[in-house]
Image (tube, rainbow, N blue to C red):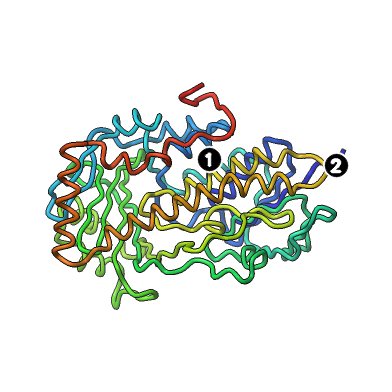
Amino acid sequence: MRQPRAVVIGAGMGGLTAAVALHRQGWHVTVLERAATLEPVGAGISLAPNSQRSLDVIGLGDDVRALAAWQGDGGLRAPDGRWLSRTSSEAAARRFGGPLVLLHRATLADLLAGHLPDGTVRTGGAATLADPGAADRPARVTTPDGDIEADLVVAADGINSAARAVLFPTHPGPVYSGFTTWRVVTPAPDRPFAAHETWGRARLWGTHPMKDGRTYAYAAAAAPAGTRAPDDEKAELLRRFGAWHHPVPDILAAAAPGRILRHDVRFMAEPLPAYHRGRVALLGDAAHAMAPTLGQGGNQAIEDAIVLAHHVTPGPGDLSPALAAYTRDRLPRTMDVVRRSARTARLFLLSGAPAVALRDTAIAAVSRFGPGLLLRGFDGIADWEPPVRTYASPTG
């Protein structure tokens, strides 16, 4: 019997996870990536217990957990160093059934790609969705090497998804959030630090250790869309954050200007009518771009991939019921995370001194009476379980 074929457009974290999950279920998978190499554009990615349990389904969860580096205290701080709310890696692991793992995107990409057959991933060529297909005909993807027909197309082509525009041409797509972000990986500072996120007046900074000894830092600030530093982004970060508490100045001193990534943040304010059409399924930022304020963008893409593979058991026939089930499972959950991320963004975007003082006082007061404040914000997100039981499931 003919082996069913799946084409994945985009070799980001969601696309590669989908490729591994579908391959393990018996699909013949081809991954088409526009970039010349598989090395991801980006710095770090935070994998919460929900995505780790998703990766358990394909046997990779423990490989990720072995890369956990955060130990001891952490929490939310003010720019002068005051702790507004404190927690610990142990408390997070107890509450959600696993650690928070911060790793470089390239590390995760290598881990996923290593579980695919040679030749699965094709780089250096743009792929275009020419026909989404239907119950009685395959989908068709155009590549520089010719057209590919597929029983299933997974559109993991990012926030500017061309496939989304083909499926839902009247949808407005993601909108600007009002803030921009910076990301950088540097050597570890000489002095130790506790993992933290720091909120100022319409500004945010985070610093976290990685298992390989380096440090991942990210920043965000309110800014008009499309603006860039008049000199370079390191100078811009020094202007905005150079006087903040340790280790921020040390991180900035160690950062190479050419290695600092800056991107405006857009999110899917209006949900799509569905995450599928014909034989095509959208996942990750292509379906539900979100603000990074809860660190869930990549995690939700990995969840998408596992749930999609769960529903689309390979075999002849119409995929419509399976793809409809994927939309039913994923659209409400992911849009809830989109909205929660946007609400968190509005809190750090407060700029008036009275409003910021009230915010910080309220966070500190609530934290004194309930130390789990930071963790409670992830209830219903980080404790998610995939639709199949896995060997590392806390309930298993």
Q: Residue furthest bottom?
A: 230
- 155 w.r.t. 303: above or below: below
Residue highlighted by disc 1 = 111
List x then y, in percent, for residue 341.
39, 54
- Disc number placed over residue 319 in the picture, else none: none
Circle 2 crowding by C-alpha within 10 Å: few under 14, some 14–19, many from 20 = few
List x then y, in percent, for residue 103.
40, 43
Q: Residue at x 71, y 46 (%)?
A: 29
**Which secondary structure, mark 1?**
helix
Q: Residue furthest top?
A: 396
Tell me: 161 left or right of 377.
right
Q: Amino acid at mark 1?
A: Leu
**Which secondary structure, mark 2?**
loop
Residue highlighted by disc 2 = 2
Q: Amino acid at mark 2?
A: Arg
Q: Residue at x 44, y 50 (%)?
A: 337
